[in-house]
Amino acid sequence: MKWLMRLLKLAFALALLGAGGVVGVYFYLAPDLPEVDSLRQVRLQEPLRVFTRDHKLIAEFGEQRRVPQAFAQIPETVIQAFLAAEDDRFFEHPGVDYQGLMRAAIQLALTREKRQGGSTITMQLARNFFLSPEKTYTRKLNEILLALRIERNMNKQEIMELYLNKIYLGNRAYGVGAAANIYYSKDLKDLSLAQAAMIAGLPKAPSSTNPVANPEKAIQRRNYVLGRMQELSFISQAEYEQALAQPISARLHLSDIELLAPYVAEMVRQEIIERFGEEAYTSGYRVTTTIDSALQRKADQALRRALQEYDMRHGYRGPEQRFDLSELPDAAAWDDILRDYPRIEQLRPALIIEVADKTATAYLGHGEQAEIPWKGFQWARPYGNVNYRKALPSTARGIVSAGDLVHVLPVAAEKEGEDGYWRLAQIPAVAGALTALDPDNGAIRALAGGYAFELSKFNRAVQANRQPGSGFKAFIYSAALAAGYTPASLIDDAPVVIDDPSLEEKWRPQNYSRKFFGPTRLRYALTKSRNLVSIRLLRSMGMEHAVGHIAKFGFDPAQLPRNLSLALGSSSVTPLKMSEGYAVLANGGYRVEPYLIDRIEESGRQVIHLARPATVCAGCPQPPGEETTAAGLPVAPRVISAENHFMMNSMLRDVIRHGTGRRAMGLGRNDLAGKTGTTNDQRDAWFNGFNRQLVTNVWVGFDSNAKLGRGEVGGRAALPAWMYFMEYALQDIPEQPLKMPPGIIQVRIDPASGKLAYAGQEGAIYEYFPRGRVPTETAPRSLDVPGEENKLSISHTPTDSADLF
């Protein structure tokens, strides 16, 4: 019995020694352990997400993709799969599974290798939040102590929720919600048993054994998890066998982007980073923009279509690159080449692999081929220069060769019963931009900054400062009306020589047609975009008055040239700034500022920013007080009179009905107004147009400021994109007639003199005047009946040709 007592004493002493060692280790390590209370306030890293006003995801910025899930939202199948894979005694142990640790200790004794083992879900959580991934005895001890602390401070549901939202699961997926999105493009609740088991098998080696990187190992791991679930009676034998038979359905869904609008997304990203710094990438901000998804999609399509049409008018520039097909033995080699060239919507890179007299075969990638018929080549006269195309070759061989890297576009059938076809195409060298605003508050409804963000990140809508040309005349004429002129005022359209010290040499401006038309009424001059009338008008009213008035439209006076070239749009402005100015002409005369971000929410959906744009409210008292609309928004200030707005709107409607923008009448609406713009040598082409509900601006030009070519004026190069967009944008919006304010009256005038028409005068026309500025003189009966060119009125259609300027 003595030996038994000695053995018991020895065991007791060893136990005391072990307990003392544990206590000693605790007091040695505990002071340096972090406080686990912080887990209750932890903010999981979430990306910055950008949405349209109708809740379509535009972009996601940030390295970690995460879709946080509350414990109650996580399906039981997913929880069971993770229990089976990682810690089946999670709901039983106190944070440390001593049985698991014993197994790990035995493994260490047998193999003399330190291997990760015995880690519970709570221990993994401790490691993920507080510790490094290195495998050392000290880290394991810290892990154990932290796990015990966590279990004392949080319940099991809280721990499991945090773990399933924190765990890395490969391909930037953090948490089970993100993994369901990335691998299956599903919400977590919609995962099948096999898919849940696949995700639960990922924590062991998320980068190397996920179903995208290594399907074979992934399915082995999934089947192991399913087997453990069946052993633990989480699933039946039948469910196990059914899930086991499921093939891998995972593939990479890097984002759930519902609308591609990268220029918009980048504008938002820059503003958010400016506000919140780099932490915006991980703080889960949800930004809702003013963008309408349908309008944005159409804006991109409209701009691309117009740029492609311009490009086709100027000829085929040749292949992007040429390859020797004898050095490219198979489709795999062709795929490698095409991989370096982006697909832009329907414009696809292609490798010409065979050419006949009237057809060519193009390889599109991944085994897909396209036959290009002769009609797909008939536009492709070789480019000579900006004003010249060479003759069309008689065969396809004269245009392309085998080994040419080109682009192709699908063309829809023109008539019922016909087939669509592929045509040769190219990436347009010309650039452009389109902006669309709500004139009531400045909300940006659509914005296209170029042909494709993949090709150029330069956002021309907000970064390209270009001369607006004749599009600026609208503001000059508004200033003239404010100075006392009327639409019937006569200005001499005659040669002028300007010797201005601010100009390098004497300036002899001309009309686009290089003709002179003598005394011309302002309405007619604006409709036909007469340059010399605008110059004389500006000189007559005075530079200071004009600049002061133009500033009311949102233009910086310091950026406006103080010489007569201002009358022809020699200042530099962005397309968005032009839309801002034209919004005043659309909304009744009120100043609004463009804005893109409507609201910003934190991860928990708490609103931290809500836009309060100044909004048009015709019946509200005007600032400078604290006046607000019925919705509690600031009232937009009136900057031009109702009479000025009405007359300008009326004249700009005539630009479309009878002038340089008359092609827009093809939309079949009577409530459209606008102004074309073209700069010297056709380097910039514009169309600025609107109705009461929407202001849209289009600019077309080269980033290098090269010439667009002969005849490429605003009405030809820019107006088509405006029409493609507005036709869609206004399709369900009824026409809104222009309401005449009380301060305007309509009278009959003599079109030659602008004076009142005498009784019974033939050829007399109607014109609008502010009360107090109606002509007092009557035209003498001796005046000849004017020629057709000066008979334009608010109700007459002229028959002469217009300056396309």
Image: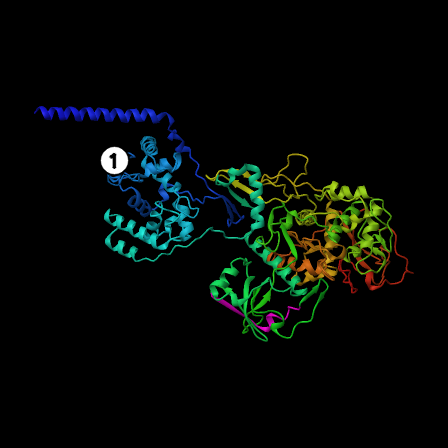
**By what rule are the colours in the image chosen?**
rainbow
Q: In this image, 51 relative to 386: left or right?
A: left
- Residue at the extreme left: 1
Q: Nearer the viewer, residue 143 or 106?
A: 106
Residue 485 visible from this viewpoint? yes
Amino acid under disc 1:
Tyr
Which residues lie in the magenta part?
Answer: 367-381
- Quadrant for the C terminus, please: bottom right
119 vs 77: above or below: above
- Residue at the extreme right: 782
Q: Nearer the viewer, residue 544 or 388?
A: 388
Q: In this image, 497 relative to 714: left or right?
A: right
In percent of width and height, residue 601 lies at 50, 40
Q: In this image, 42 relative to 101: left or right?
A: right
In percent of width and height, residue 31 lies at 37, 25
Q: How many marks?
A: 1
749 vs 152: above or below: below
Q: Nearer the viewer, residue 687 or 124?
A: 124
In percent of width and height, residue 521 lies at 82, 55
Name the residue that disc number 1 marks.
98
Could you say which quadrant of the image residue 719 lies in? bottom right
Whether 610 is among the magenta residues is no
Q: In this image, 254 relative to 532: left or right?
A: left
Q: For the point 26% across and 48% down, which residue is it? A: 228
Whether 378 is among the magenta residues is yes
Residue 770 visible from this viewpoint? no
Could you say which quadrant of the image residue 389 lies in? bottom right
In percent of width and height, residue 395 lies at 62, 74
What is the crowding at mark 1: few (fewer than 14 residues within 10 Å), some, or many (at least 20)?
A: some
- Quadrant for the N terminus, please: top left
SS class, disc 1: helix
